[in-house]
Image (spheres, helix red, strand yellow):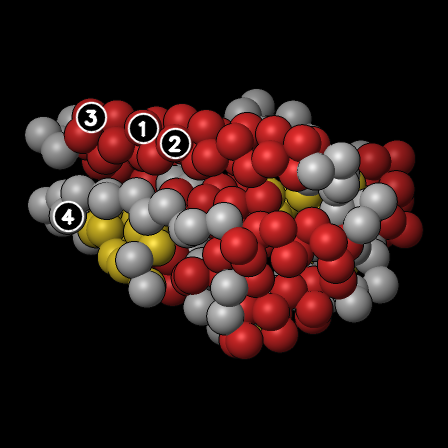
Amino acid sequence: MVYVDFDHEIPRYVYTGCANCSSVMGISMCSITNRGCCYYYPKYTLVDIQKMARTLEGLTFLNSIIQLPTREVEPFRIIAKGYFDRKSYNEYIMGKNRLNISNIQDHSIFFKACPFVKSGFGCTLPPRYRTYVCNFFLCDEIIQSIKTKNCFEVYIRERERYVRWIEWENTSLMKILQEYKVDLIKDWEGSIRILQDIPLNIYEFPKLHPIVVDTGSSRGA
Ligand code: SF4
Ligand code: SF4
């Protein structure tokens, strides 16, 4: 089943089959196995950072991202870089056993893992601290299994609307920081204080009807 879930008003799409992921994207050739499609390095935008900066729990989490040895801070976002088994990837690329998969161009994903995923468990973060990419990703296998269902178009359309809203909010927050002549690199503390003082806008995501999948597969988020 695919359905909409909320964690402290933060929406996400859930596919119940993710617990038994058999998708191509779920293939792992690194030491972190059974990690579903959580090879992704989450990119925390100003909307995410503002949300975290407003509670003690969120601030604690934000600090844990900043303390990641491989995180990258950009002027208006933070990339939580994770694990990459580059040696095995290089051997794989040079070898003859490359997977013959036409819909995946970047095979480095098979050797990567998000810093927040745990083998065989999935994401260790509550959904409210995940990025919208994490919360709304549906792999090709899921799309194929639900695309003929009546509600499918609505799910895609509502996701697109939400992403446009996030982009709008991010642009607005970026402009405010620019007016104060600060960014996350130039003045981290100052940027966080400004974000804390800006009222938090909440998106009213619709409570869509669940989609029942006829056949499914599926570990990860
Ligand atoms: S969305 Fe779910 S089923 Fe698809 S690759 Fe990710 S964990 Fe697997
Ligand atoms: S869902 Fe969680 S573990 Fe997976 S990529 Fe996103 S933050 Fe990382």
Mark closer to the chain start, 2 or 4: 2
Q: Looking at numbered disc 3 in the image, what kind of residue is underneath it? A: Glu
Residue 18 appears at what percent x and percent y?
A: 38, 57
Camera-nearest label, 1 or 2: 2
**Residue placed under numbered mark 1 in the picture:** 161
Residue 197 appears at what percent x and percent y?
A: 53, 54
CB within 8 Å, label 1 to label 2? yes
- Specify whether residue 59 is in view: yes
> Distance from label 1 to label 2 (Cα)?
6 Å
Mark closer to the chain start, 2 or 3: 3
Q: What secondary structure is marked by label 2?
A: helix
Vertical placement of 105 versus 184: above or below? above
> Distance from label 3 to label 1 (Cα)?
12 Å
The mark found on residue 207 in the picture is 4
Q: Is mark 1 within 8 Å of ligand 1?
A: no
Q: Residues within 10 Å of mark 1 (few under 14, many from 20)?
A: few
Vertical placement of 127 versus 212: above or below? below
Name the foreground residue: 94 vs 126. Answer: 126
Q: Looking at numbered disc 2 in the image, what kind of residue is underneath it? A: Trp
Q: Residues within 10 Å of mark 2 (few under 14, many from 20)?
A: few
The mark found on residue 153 in the picture is 3
Q: Is residue 98 left or right of residue 152?
A: right
Q: Looking at numbered disc 1 in the image, what kind of residue is underneath it? A: Arg
Residue 124 appears at what percent x and percent y?
A: 53, 71
Residue 136, by quadrant, is top left
Mark closer to the chain start, 1 or 4: 1
Vertical placement of 197 versus 126: above or below? above
**Residue placed under numbered mark 2 in the picture:** 165
